Amino acid sequence: MKNIAVLVSGGGTNLQALIDAQNSGIIKSGRIVAVVSSKAGAYALERAKRAGIETAVISKKEEGENYSHAMTEFMKARHIDLIVLAGFLSILDGELLHEYRDRIINIHPSLIPSFCGDGFYGLRVHQAALDYGVKVTGATVHFVNEIVDGGKIIMQKAVYIDPSDTAETLQRRVMEEAEWVILPRAVEMVCGGELETKN
Ligand code: GAR
């Protein structure tokens, strides 16, 4: 059984999908032992507490240069095997990426390599897809390395864009049809060793 830490920054609907998947048995090779938020007050922390999961706030702003080390120490102290970024909006670097190489995964709300990289997060991703005029978008789960949204792809799911979509309606549909489906599956794949984890 792998120990999972989930990193969050906001509402935590992807965290909720992971908690639900754990309860329903979709995730059976790992369990969420900690939820770390980049900021206090994130609603995701309430979801974690409700599920009886340990919570912490580790912020880049407060930790400064010690941030990556503080994160690494937190993970090591809890024997974390897999770190899942679920709506986590800080960029990771340094010691944590080195220590947890091939053991950090992220969900991104587009079909990488479209609409990704620095500055593409949350609603901005969906607005960019609408502005470009693509007819299909989706979500991607990938390994995290030094390149923002540049690690090896684990799973993707496509979602059709409706002519009447706004960034908000598109975000919601991409979450429902893609993110909440593929993130739990990818977590189980990685925890269950179904995947070659070399990045
Ligand atoms: C999700 O759509 C997630 O894919 C996205 O932020 C949202 C968080 O929602 N992540 C990124 O844009 C990362 N680049 P949630 O807090 O309800 O899971």
Image (cartoon, helix red, strand yellow):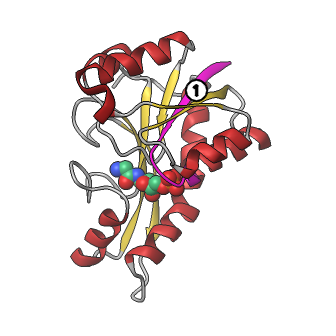
Q: Is residue 131 magenta?
A: no
Q: Please state which of residues 51 and 168 is positioned toward the viewer in this rendering.
A: 51
Give the position of the C terminus as an image quadrant. top left
> Label 1: which residue?
4
Residue sitting at x 56%, y 51%: 43
Judge whether residue 66 can be spotted in this image.
yes
Position in image of residue 47 (x %, y %) = 65, 47
Q: Is residue 11 magenta?
A: yes
Residue 174 to residue 52: above or below: below
Q: Please state which of residues 89 and 83 is positioned toward the viewer in this rendering.
A: 89
Position in image of residue 48 (x %, y %) = 65, 40
Position in image of residue 46 (x %, y %) = 64, 46
Magenta span: 1-14
Residue sitting at x 41%, y 44%: 88
Q: Give the SS element for disc 1.
A: strand
Give the position of the N terminus as an image quadrant. top right
Q: Residues within 10 Å of mark 1 (few under 14, many from 20)?
A: many
Q: Please state which of residues 150 and 69 is positioned toward the viewer in this rendering.
A: 69
Position in image of residue 31 (x %, y %) = 67, 28
Residue 153 to residue 69: above or below: below
Residue sitting at x 44%, y 46%: 9
Residue 189 to residue 123: above or below: above
